[in-house]
Image (spheres, rainbow, N blue to C red):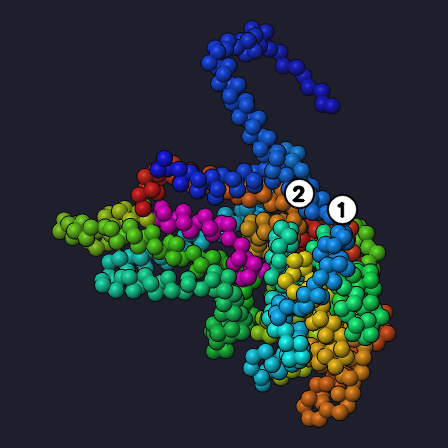
Amino acid sequence: MLSSPALLWLLVLFIIPMFAMASLALQEGSAIEGFRMTWRFANFTEAISANGEYLLRSLRNGVIVTLVALLLAYPVAYWIAFYGGRFKSVFLFLLLLPFFISFVIRTVAWSFILSDEGIVFGTLKSIGLLPESVTVLGTTFAVIAGITYNLLPFTILPLYVSLEQIDRGLVEAAQDLYASKVEAFLKVVFPLSLPGVFAALLLTSIPAIGDYVNAAVLGGPGTAMIGNIIQSEFLRARDYPEAAALAFVLMAVMLVAAIAYARLLGTERVTEA
Amino acid sequence: MNERKQPRTDPAWIRGMTQRRMSRRDVLRYAGVGASALGLSSILAACGVEGEQQTTGPTAGGEGSPEWWADMKAAGPGDHINFTNWPAYIDRDFSIEGPGSRPSLFAFIESTGIDVTYRADINANEDFYAAIRPAMEAGQDTGHDIIVITNGQELTEMIQLGYLIELDPELRPNFDANAGPTFRDPAFDPGNVYTMAWQSGMTGIAYNTKYVDEPITTLEGMLNPKYAGHVAMFGNNADAPCLAMIELGIDPETSTPDDWQQAADFLQRFNESGVLRQWTDQAYLTGMENEDLWVSMAWSGDILNDKLYYPEFATFEFTTPEAGGIVWVDNCCIPNNAANPVGAMMLMDWYYQPEYAAMLTEWNAYVSPVPAGGEIVQADAAAAKGANKEVLETIAASPYVFPPPELEAKLHNYRVLEGDEIETWNDLFLPIFLT
């Protein structure tokens, strides 16, 4: 009986919406005349064949974002966990402070910052450090940078939690046994932080692959991601079945990736963090 | 039918496969699976999405009917109107703080005592429609009493689906007295049953002479590698396709799917050229202003207003393409279940008084639906002094505010799409705007 609220939660927020979407993905019709269930599985094959390019691009962006975010986040999390001292929570708060502002507004702010004659590139160009022709907005670089920025807290926090839990005595013990600082890190700290790394990987890569705001605001031709296609199918073309099928495909791809990854590296490591 | 060679199979194997011995428990179990599968599929099948096609026109006594309007008028206009419009579309006086900074609107508030919340929230017809559609679909108040929608796919659909309130002919005396002939009884809304024009304007090309030293009068000219990374086109499903057709010598209004294919191929070149920075919407104006964009598809008044009222944008130029431009009408309409339909109509009609129509024109430099307002603009320009005189004279003389017959002859309307055409059109053009 104790589990029933959880079940209800799962039913209302997960199972019913999934069902509605599965059903929608198999229908045919138009927004004006209505959609009828015709068990049209071709919606799926059509969705994949028409949008394979965007799926691949989203996966690629997701992988790059995740790697860059990890590289950026690990030193930050490490420093706060090991050297933050009594200001740890202050540092964490500072880290989260920009994220009290809405996701979209932060992204739009970046479109001003990255503008050709904006505060960054305008200045660099005027002092001659960059040629006039450099343009960042509207490129894949801007989109990936935007997603990385927006997801960075989701990478840092799990890393911080796992690093923070590491017993400092173990590092000292390693050094007592003549391990250098680097060896102590590689053989003790890093392996112990792996659950955090895995959690950070999942928490970063999944929203990164499905993101559409950054491509819409910071992107240009050739940067649309699968989320943009789903949004356009739902809201502009209003081809609900194809949009639903595509959303399902995306979910399936991510689920398979997550499962493969958990299989490869062991689920306990994912759930530990 | 495909003819396939029958595989040779051992009969014993078939027997073994087909005559499987089943225990009673098995039977029950499979029956259970079958039943739940059936149940599952019937649930799935039951989740159809209702069509929204409705018989247009209000039901007797329903919203928009004369009886309903009589009740509404008896109740009187409320004390508040939510007016949602496009940016850079209403006269501003930046020397005044608060509601007074929009003088023509403030005059309405002062005169009627009805408070108006003015929002410049509409950046693209598609996106705005997508945002209010769920409320309209569910028969709820969208939170807007007046919305401004361009003639086109979205407006046509809203009318077809019965999402807009039929206007009360008695509540628009100024419209009846002063609306210009082209704004009465338009093809997209015969009899002005659902709409009254806010402003009209043209889609053409804008460029910044600070970076561009030649007039750009064709879409082809926008593809110049010199401007790589600083060119934008509209990504809505009407402007770019129609302008492309005009450049290809096709009249969009009578175009066929083959013509659309040609236009799509033409537009696809923008994706492949490496010149285009973005398929954009109203955000093009910000892009022009911060000089990310040097050349962009543009709406006439936006550029003229920037050029005239802000010295830093004096280098902006607007032109309709050589082959011809697009003329469109932005229309005020009232969504179903709006909280204050009577007040909304009063406000819509307010702007059909020539003096207030003139205030709009003198600021936003769009084409006014009120010709008598134009005369006031001309008179004001003649009477003005100082810097303001130059601005007003430029507006009074602009072909994009008071189009002469030779320009009008080169202006086209959007293609009106019906039935299956919508899907064909969207399938051709939407993928171009999202690459």
Residue placed most toward the observer, B41 or A101: B41
Q: Quadrant of the N terminus of chain B?
A: top right
In the rendered structure, does residue B243 fall within the stretch colored magenta?
Answer: no
Instruction: Name the residue: 76% across, 68% down.
Output: B171
Q: Which amino acid, mark 1?
A: Asp
In the rendering, at what x and y percent does residue B50 appear? Answer: 66, 42
Please state which of residues B11 and B330 is positioned toward the viewer in this rendering: B330
Secondary structure of residue under mark 1: helix
Q: What amino acid type is highlighted by mark number 2?
A: Glu
Q: Residues within 10 Å of mark 2 (few under 14, many from 20)?
A: few
Which of B91/A156 is in front? B91
Identify the disc placed on residue B50: 2
Q: Secondary structure at mark 2?
A: loop
Residue under the image location 49 percent in, 69 percent down: A113
Q: Quarter-wise, where is residue B204 in the image?
A: bottom right
Graded by Cα atoms within 10 Å as few (under 14), some (14 to 19) or many (20 or more), the crowding at tag 1 reads few
**Side (left or right) of A111 relative to A157:** right
Report the span colored magenta: A197-220
Q: Earlier in the sequence, mark 2 or mark 1?
A: 2
Q: Label 1 belongs to which residue?
A: B420
Q: Is residue A199 magenta?
A: yes
Residue B287's spot in the image, x, y percent?
A: 60, 70
- Does mark 1 fall on the same chain as mark 2? yes
